[in-house]
Image (cartoon, rainbow, N blue to C red):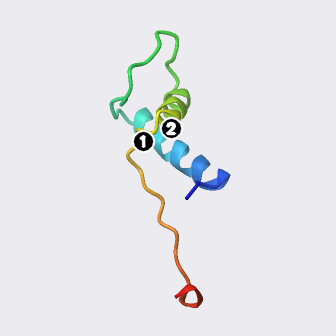
Amino acid sequence: MEMTRFEKARVVGARALQLAMGAPPLIELPSHVFEPFEIARLEFAADVVPLTVYRPTSAASE
């Protein structure tokens, strides 16, 4: 299932925070990219972000 724009923003933001706190990047970076947010966006585009979104399910959907 596709992520909503809100889920994408949450995942990229959480990964950017991890990078800002010293987590190593998971992709090879171009020499001009230094900002944690830009690195997180590149990682998200490469589908290597190690975060998962769990959606609650209601009892009505069972």
- Of residue 30 and residue 2, the one placed in the foreground of this image is 2
> Circle 2 — which element?
helix
Q: Does 58 appear above or below 13?
A: below
- Residue 19, x across and y down, in percent: 42, 34
> Circle 1 — which element?
loop
The answer to whether 17 appears left or right of 9 in the picture is left
Identity of the residue drawn at 59% across and 48% down: 8
Q: Does 10 appear above or below 21?
A: below
Disc 1 to disc 2: CB gap under 8 Å: yes
Q: Label 2: few (<14), some or many (≥20) within 10 Å?
A: some
The answer to whether 21 appears left or right of 33 in the picture is left
The answer to whether 61 appears left or right of 5 in the picture is left
- Residue 26, x across and y down, in percent: 36, 31
Give the distance between the C-alpha atoms of the residues marked 1 and 2, in whole angstroms: 6 Å
- Of residue 1 and residue 52, the one placed in the foreground of this image is 1
Q: Amino acid at mark 1?
A: Val
Per the rendering, the mark at residue 49 is 1
Determine the residue located farthest toward the right in the rendered image. Answer: 5
Q: Amino acid at mark 2?
A: Phe
Identity of the residue drawn at 35% across and 32% down: 22
Identity of the residue drawn at 43% across and 18% down: 29
Q: Does 38 appear above or below 21?
A: above
Residue named by callout 2: 44
Identity of the residue drawn at 53% across and 42% down: 12
Specify the quadrant of the image occupied by residue 1: bottom right
